[in-house]
Amino acid sequence: MARERTAHHAPDGGAQAGTSAGPQTVPGESPARPGLVRRIVRGRPADPRWARPALLALLAVTAALYVWDLSASKYANQFYSAAVQAGSVSWKAFFFGSSDAANAITVDKPPASLWPMELSVRLFGLNSWAILVPEALMGVTTVGVLYATVRRRFGAAAGLLSAGALALTPVAALMFRFNNPDAMLCLLMVCAVACVLRALEAGRTKWLVLAGVCFGLGFLTKTLQAWLILPALAVVYACCAPVAVRKRLGQLLLAGAALVVSGGWWVAIVELLPASARPYVGGSQTNSFLELTFGYNGLGRIDGNERGSVGGGHGGAGGRGGGWGETGITRLFSSDMGGQISWLLPAALILLVVAVCVLWRARRAVAAEQAAQRAEFLVWGGALLMTFTIFSFMSGIFHQYYNIALSPYIAALVGMGSVLVWRRGGWVARSVLAGVAAVTATWSYVLLDRSPQWLPWLRWTVLVLGLLAALGLLLSAGADARVRRRAGVVAGVAAGLGVATALAGPLAYTLDTLNTPKGGSIITAGPAVQGGRGLRRRPEPDVRAGRRQGRRAGRHHRRAGLRGPGLPGRSGLPRGPGLPRRRADGRLARPAGWRRRARRPDARRRRHGRSARRRLGERPGQAPGGAERRPLHLGRRGDRFAERRELPTGHPEAGDGDRRLQRERPVADPRPVPALCGGGEDPLLHRRRAGRLPRRPHRPGRRRRQADGWSAGGRQAGRRFRRRSGGAGHLVPDQRLDREDLQEGHRRRCHLLRPDPAKGVLTRRRTWPRKRKCTAYKNPCTV
């Protein structure tokens, strides 16, 4: 039994024969065809009168949004802009996608996404408009193709809702104004899905072959990412095509051949040419495009074992997903990804499940039409679930803007599902729509609450209006026959309010994206976000390591190393309070959460030069840093103690940086330091002549001089000195670890201790003979 065609699927493009929807014709005369302008403005005769004007208005608004202040981003991603410039002056660089006109190395992607921009630059010259306008036109084309695809089965209302949702998705608005390959990939994937759906209508082979061509061009755009949805579409066609099973398999083989030819011709040329006749394949380890495809751009993105890339700009490591966020089913709902794509993702998943359940129980009278609608839901839903699953669990490089691949699938499911459930009527359908409106409003509130300082009124407005829309749908569902007409009006108003509130958050994010210039290799849409109230994440390992290094470097200050609230920034960075406030007397206020450490009643006053034993509160011979730290014994044998060069990480006490002579800048005092034995005030060491140094009393039974030629030095004003044997009054200052030298021109820095990088402690240097010139520094001195 042949499948019935709907009004907008009639062979002539108009209404079915025998109805009054189409124009009446006189027998023997050909029907009068409307003019071109009328067809463009009016559209198909079967469509409502408002459908085509609404579509044209939507496309015009989308084009205005995508080209608004486009030159503010200048050359956007300079990595690809350099390749565009090279391809505009060299046809060889154009073909291979070289980064420079000399064809030394290519970019780490195939060149198909560069070709439209390079042709535009050849025509209009090198400028930001010539590079970015083709991307904006791809965005407008994607919106139009999505509308036409959804309208064929679900009408103009569903098509407009889907197209509007795609146009206002923040990550789509971001990437259709940028010169990354993702814009062209999104257009090709929508075209591939549209061709598969056309093939499912009547089992036509040409549409399936065109779908294979789209997948092949997608491979030349971003390699294997274009094939993420290929298994889902092949399975749906093999199960739902209205032709025999043998013919289905033959059509799939032809589509595969078209894919190989359209995507493999360039790869074959690159692989067959000798390496000396082509540029080096950027991002590869062996100068092979196949190795790049299945390595860095392929399986490396799944398991995280990437090697290569010449693009740069990647983040640090962190969590199970490296520096690209935690992997898992909630990855796309996290603070990093949620504001980019997940505004309508819960609604799309709910409507997908409801629509499949409704269409699976199709009555035999309309089974053919509902089977076609079910196949369309399976195509869009399968593409969404495949991409969602891979993006959620891939451990390799994953940027936020990759989520543009999900935007057309989410938009199509929201438009088709909403219209399908609305047309079903009844209290069950209205209850489902009410639940979808409530969930979408609540999730929009959560996403907006992650940027509490940005439009604080918007999240409450969206939440309240969304809940009111859900309440209106519930009230209209329970109305009886006496007020059914009035309830229909209430339901229509509530549905419109629900759509407006669902798109309010994405619209605000999109407008913020348009007003912010974007550049570099890692970009995001919308304002800065944080972990959310009560949902703060643990900082990434590199952030924690940076904090530890900051605490170590700042131990010379008595309040250094305090854990602060951080700085405001993008997701993954903690939220900060901004600049410190001032008190009434003009002094800076203390940081939030800072409190003075309570002093013990018996504690003595802190002073410079205290011993490491008393500073650390340790007993002689006790190692606070563990077995890995080695003590350095200085002074007389009876007066030795373990000098600790570095405190353990997180030690509550301050370090030894508060001692005298440890200056914050290496050039704090440019004056040369006079000889210590020459008398007078020392401006650097705050010491007088060496002859005035106090001597410790000699202990009976102890040797006055040690075998290594050293004697104990005095300790005053927080500085340790060593007295050279045989040289009366000559003192050598000790050099501190991890600190700058005292001064570049200091004449008396010929110390006998130097740091050992392998052990992290001070080792003794060979004692220089007397009257020998020291040439280790700019100003040699006689020691």
Image (spheres, grey):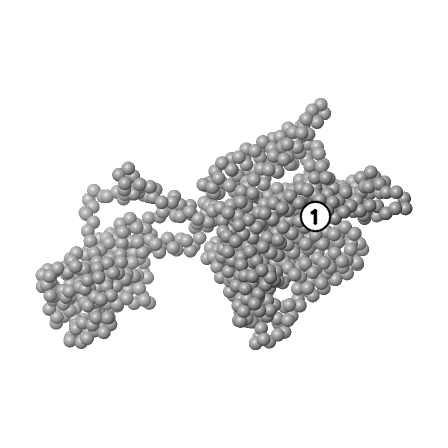
Residue at 57% over, 69% down: 90
Count of numbered marks:
1
Residue type at the position of mark 1? Ala
Q: Position of residue 316 (x, y in %)?
A: 46, 57
Q: Position of residue 584 (x, y in %)?
A: 28, 37
From the image, tell me which residue sits under label 1.
148
Looking at the rendering, which quadrant does residue 275 occupy?
Answer: bottom right
Q: Closer to the camera, 222 or 755?
A: 222
Camera sees residue 373:
no
Q: Position of residue 161 (x, y in %)?
A: 65, 42
Q: Position of residue 257 (x, y in %)?
A: 72, 64
Looking at the rendering, which quadrant does residue 227 occupy?
Answer: bottom right
Looking at the rendering, which quadrant does residue 542 occupy?
Answer: bottom left
Residue at 68% over, 47% down: 147
Direction from residue 524 to residue 10 in the image, left or right: right
Above/below status of 182 relative to 591: below
SS type, badge 1: helix
Camera sees residue 191:
yes
Crowding at dot 1, Cα within 10 Å, few <14 / some 14-19 / many 20+, comes out as some
Q: Closer to the camera, 222 or 659?
A: 222
Q: Residue furthest top?
A: 482
Above/below status of 471 relative to 763: above
Residue at 51% over, 51% down: 524
Direction from residue 278 to residue 36 in the image, left or right: right
